[in-house]
Structure formats: C-alpha cells, structure tokens
Image (spheres, helix red, strand yellow):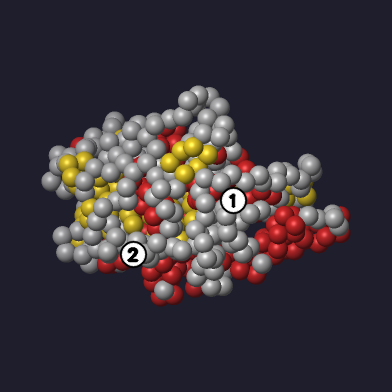
Amino acid sequence: MSRKSAVSARPEFMSRRGVLQAGAMGLGLNVANLSALRSLANRPDRSRAKSVLFIFLTGGLSQHDSFDMKPDAPSDIRGEFNPIATQTPGTQVCEHLPLLAQRSKQWSLLRSMQTGSNGHEPACHMLLTGRLDFPAGFSLRKVPSLNEWPSIPAMVRYAYRDQPHGKMPPAVILPEPSVNEVGKVRPGQYAGRLGNHWDAWHIDIASKCPLGNGACPDCFRFEGTPFEHAASTIFDAPTLTLPQGGNLRLQGRVDLLDFIQGQQQQLEQSAGGLDSHRKQAISVLTDPKVRSAFDVERADAKTLERYGKNKFGLSVLMGKRLIEAGVNLVQVNLGKNSSWDTHRRNFVNLKENLLPPLDQCISALLDDMSASGLLEETLVVVTGEFGRTPKINKDAGRDHWGPVNTMLFAGGGVRPGNVIGASDRNGAEPVADLQTPENFAATIYEALGIPREAMWSDVDGRPHKIYHGRPIEGLMA
C-alpha cells in the first residue's frame, strides 16, 4: 500500500460534519470510527513524517533508572543501576537497556518534559490531550465524559476528516485502554468535548489479566508475590457489536483470522441490507494487511524472538503493521495497571520485568523500520505520563513526579543522537529547555501535517485551536 498522500486540497478544519452514529462494529470501535476516514492534503514541508507511533508507558517510567541517570548523586537518589555508554559520545543510559544503547544513533532524548501533576489521572489527561488545563466541569468521578479535552488521536481523526483515506482510520489505540488496578479508565483517552463520534479506533484485544502488570504472559505483581498470567493467550478474540444492539462473539478461543472470517460470514448471512458504512467496516476487517497486523501471535519464529512473544513486543509489532497498512497515528499502551508505577521494588521490577522487554521490542522496531525505510517517515515516541521521584522511598521504590520526565524520539525527521534539555543534578527539575504537553502535542500534529492555524468545534459549537504550543525546538534535523 502506498504511503503517499493521494489528495489535492487541505481540509477545512472549521467545518463540522454529521457522522452516522449507528452503534459499534468490530474490535470495540464505533461504526462512525470507520465512516469518513480521512487524510491530509498538500502536506507542508516542515516534516518528513507521514505517521506517528506513540508508545505510552502507562504508570510513569523512572527517568533516573533509564534515560537520565545521575551517577554522581547521593546513593538514595542515584539508585542501584549503573550507566553505560551509547554509540553517541557523551550520552549514557541504564545498563539494562543495552540494545537501545547500541542504537543511539537512531534516536534522541528530551530530558526536560514537565506535566503539571503528580497524580496518574490528571497527568494522563495532560499528556494524552496535550493540555495542562482542564475544561469546565472536568471531574475524575466520571471518566470518560464530554468534560475532557479531546485526546491527541481523536484530534488527529478530526483533523483528517475531510478527504478520503482508503480503508484505514487515521488514528488507532491498542491493545487496551489505560486503566488502574480496579478497572477505572483514566481520563484523556477519548474524544471528550469533540463528541464521541470523533473517537479514535480503540482496539481492545488484550487477553484479560486483571491484576497482571507488565508484558503478559510474563506478568508480575510489584510486591513479588507469585503470579500467573490469567489467560491462555496474549490477545483475545474481540467482540463485534452491531448497530442497534446485539453482539456476535465466537465461543471459546479462536485465532484472530478465523474470528474475523467467521464474523464476516455471519454478517453477510444475517444483515443483507448493510449500508455503506457497515460494508466499509467489514472491508477493513477483512483487508489482508489489517488481518496480518492483528495476527501477530502467528508471526514467524524469528520475528517473535526479536520482538518478544509477550504483550509489549506483540503490541509494538501490531502498531508497526498498522502503520504499514496506512494508519497515520497509532498509540500503543504498554501496560494497563500502571505497569511502570514502581512504588515498590523499583529496581527488581525494572531489571527483571520491565526494562528487558522494552529494550527488546523498541530495538527490534527501530531495526525493522530502518531497514524498510519506514523510520524516515514515521515519528516514534516513547514516554510515560510523568517521571518518578529523585529520592528512593522506604519500599525501594520511586513515587510519582510531574516536574520532569524524559521522552525518547526517533524517525520522522528527528535529529538522531541528540539530547534536548536537561534536569538538575538530582533529576528533580528541568534546568534547560523546559517543555510541556502542549509542545509534545504540537510536535505530533506538525509531524502529521496539521496546519498550525487549524481549529476544531466542540459539542456546543464553540471554536478552539488545535495547537496550544509549538513543536519541540531542536528535535528535528
């Protein structure tokens, strides 16, 4: 499938289109998610990227123990890990990221991101929407709701609304939403004030493992008590919900290809009068590239070995394949139960359960995208919603820390081997090039060619700017 734009006119960002709302269809998405699938025209020359792969480390990775180590700080700050040299002179990373260290000429770091909260829910809303402020009526008691700002993927879907985009939606989130340990959804993941018909395509296919953190089936509990993956698979067969209610779900475990083929047959037999939107939904689900993207558990043995046969590796592989199939923005949630929320046994859990699969899958991703040329036109971002405290707590963990965080960027015109910004000697505060979620979102929007003057209208018809910051200066070559 060609990744080149086939349209000839820039979308009108202030227009508002009525979208058919006829329920949901396929893999947890609304039929509206598959109607009016859009692409941008007349891409500006500011960016080389055509797509973005956003890898979200839900729970918050410790910057001290990954990409912004402080070996000269006191022992209760620097921690147990040692830094190692990368291929970039002067840049060091954690000893438990050896593969990424070898590939440092493919990526850059931002060490001065600041979110405005130490709480998961507010910080997630800030990062995932690209805004430090909250809309009127925002409340953590009701999530998701219309009183949230639109997520970055929802905003991308809206911005790409006015031109045909083939079969694929502009924005996808997988393999499950970010929730806490009691299953409560965190804010900032949905369309909010845009209206739910602009939601991104949410692919909720991870097998249910309610209390498991990390890369299922190699999941764990922070306190170190024995734990086994709660399902027999990594990904489960999704439910296909039809308009006007009713679910079609095959009983028992089936692989994704058989599931999709079976659902297509049932739909064709039982719903002869399909409208164009529902037909488009079926065509998406049965497209060979899409089916291949979902069927990652049956990838060849070499690919599985390189990415890791676990939820981290296979989710990243699925995200790459969806980019190849034509999706413009894919958000991959690595962990649902605050998997990176290392209040306890920070060093044990990072060393044994978290950093190795992250190092493995991101390195395999960069290798494959570089070899195919896809990295040149895909911006890759890896980050959590905040960093973690400089001081190690009584449980050998680190707590939430909004003042500073580190992000990794690669591809899409990023200047490789670069470090932007800096934190202080203890990794507590930015001391150079302070950046905010507004600039993070602007970097993504510009990478996707969304004009800086673009606007959107909320559910009450009020106009809003899409951009609330400027792309991160010095990031792009």
Crowd around label 1: few <14 · some 14–19 · many ≥20 (10 Å): many
Residues under labels 1 and 2: Cα distance? 26 Å
Quadrant of the image occupied by residue 265 = bottom right
Rendered-image quadrant of the N terminus: bottom right
Residue 433 seen in the current view? yes
Residue indicated by mark 1: 201
Q: Which secondary structure lies at badge 2?
A: loop
SS at badge 1: strand
Query: Quick one: quadrant of the C terminus?
Result: bottom left
The residue drawn where x is 49% and y is 37% is 463
Classify mark 2: residues with Cα within 10 Å, few (<14), some (14-19) or many (20+): many
Query: In front: 388, or 26?
Result: 26
Location of residue 160 in the rendering, given as x and y in whole percent from the top left corner: 53, 54
Q: Is residue 47 above or below residue 345?
A: below
**In this view, 15 is above or below 418:** above
The tag earlier along the polypeptide, 1 or 2, is 1
Where residue 254 sits: x, y (%)? 71, 58
Residue 165 image point, x, y percent: 59, 62
Q: Quadrant of residue 224?
A: top left
Residue 229 vs residue 426, the one in the foreground:
426
Residues 119 and 335: in front is 119
237 with respect to 82 (left or right) = right
Q: What type is the residue that disc 1 sits on?
A: Trp
Please give the label number shown on residue 306.
Answer: none
Query: Residue, x 40% and y 42% (percent of image)?
Result: 130
Return the residue at label 2.
Answer: 413
Q: Name the kind of residue labelled 2 in the image.
A: Gly
Identify the residue at image location x=43%, y=58%.
Answer: 449
Decide if residue 324 is on the left or right side of residue 33.
Answer: left
Tell me whether circle 1 and circle 2 mark residues in contact (CB < 8 Å). no
Instruction: Judge by depth and name the residue closer to the eye, 117 or 307.
Output: 117
Residue 353 appears in the rendering:
no
